Amino acid sequence: MRKFIRITALITVAAIAIYGIGRVTGPSVYTEIEIAAPAPAVWAVLADTEGHADWNPLIISMEGEVKEGAQLRNVLQLPGASPMEFTPRVLVATENVELRWLGDAGVPGIFDGEHYFLLEETGGGTTLFRHGENFTGFLSYPIFAFIGDDTKAGFEAMNAALKQRVEGSL
């Protein structure tokens, strides 16, 4: 009986430690691209939720308002994968500067992602578009091991499509 209690305690401590590590820090993806347009032109395309279906190869559908506290309904399609619906909550929506939302895999704390888009005017009418996501949660590392490369490829494809869409509209 003592052995069972010790093993159970050890498993519990290990699970709590793994959960804690996943909540504090996790894997992340970071991409950037320079767009030959001012930040308001980039923001206009990014914040047009209905327009994503026309140009975005990653977030193939987006519904809702881009405003702090709002919930979006997005359909994500990573390269080579089936579409997946998720409903993130907008954390930050600063016009022409930043859009940030938090989504989860249905249950917070299992696999959460804080997705962000940062726009920085670099002079000469160009904008540096930074696009990334920070993952946390109990299963963030194991899941990321399977989707990390495809996630980065999807972000880069979205960045290139955004650049083409914005620059083509000027």
Image (tube, rainbow, N blue to C red):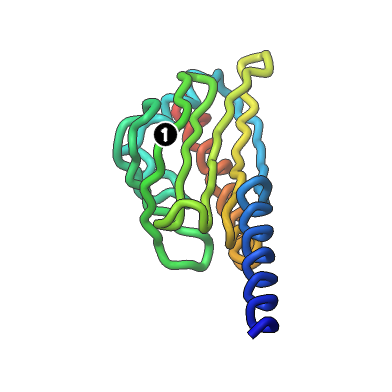
Q: Does residue 162 sit above or below 92 in this rendering?
A: below
Q: Can residue 15 be spotted in the picture? A: yes
Q: Does residue 28 sit above or below 106 in this rendering?
A: above
Q: Examine the image and state in which quarter residue 138 appears.
A: bottom right
Which of these two is toward me, 40 or 105?
A: 105
Q: Residue at x 56, y 53 (%)?
A: 154
Image location (x, y in percent) of residue 164? 52, 38
Which of these two is toward me, 152 or 161?
A: 152
Q: What is the count of numbered marks?
A: 1
Q: Examine the image and state in which quarter residue 82 appears.
A: bottom left
Q: Does residue 67 sit above or below 11 in this rendering?
A: above
Image location (x, y in percent) of residue 21? 68, 53
| Disc 1 residue type (three-letter) | Val
Q: Residue at x 58, y 28 (%)?
A: 118
Image location (x, y in percent) of residue 128? 65, 27
Q: Residue at x 48, y 67 (%)?
A: 81
Q: Quadrant of the N terminus?
A: bottom right
Which of these two is toward me, 108 or 94?
A: 108
Q: Secondary structure at mark 1?
A: strand
Which residue is most to the front? 2
Q: Residues within 10 Å of mark 1 (few under 14, many from 20)?
A: many
Q: Examine the image and state in which quarter residue 15 appears.
A: bottom right
Q: Residue at x 40, y 26 (%)?
A: 68
Q: Can residue 149 be spotted in the picture? A: no
Image location (x, y in percent) of residue 102? 47, 41
Which of these two is toward me, 157 or 113?
A: 113
Residue linked to disc 1: 90
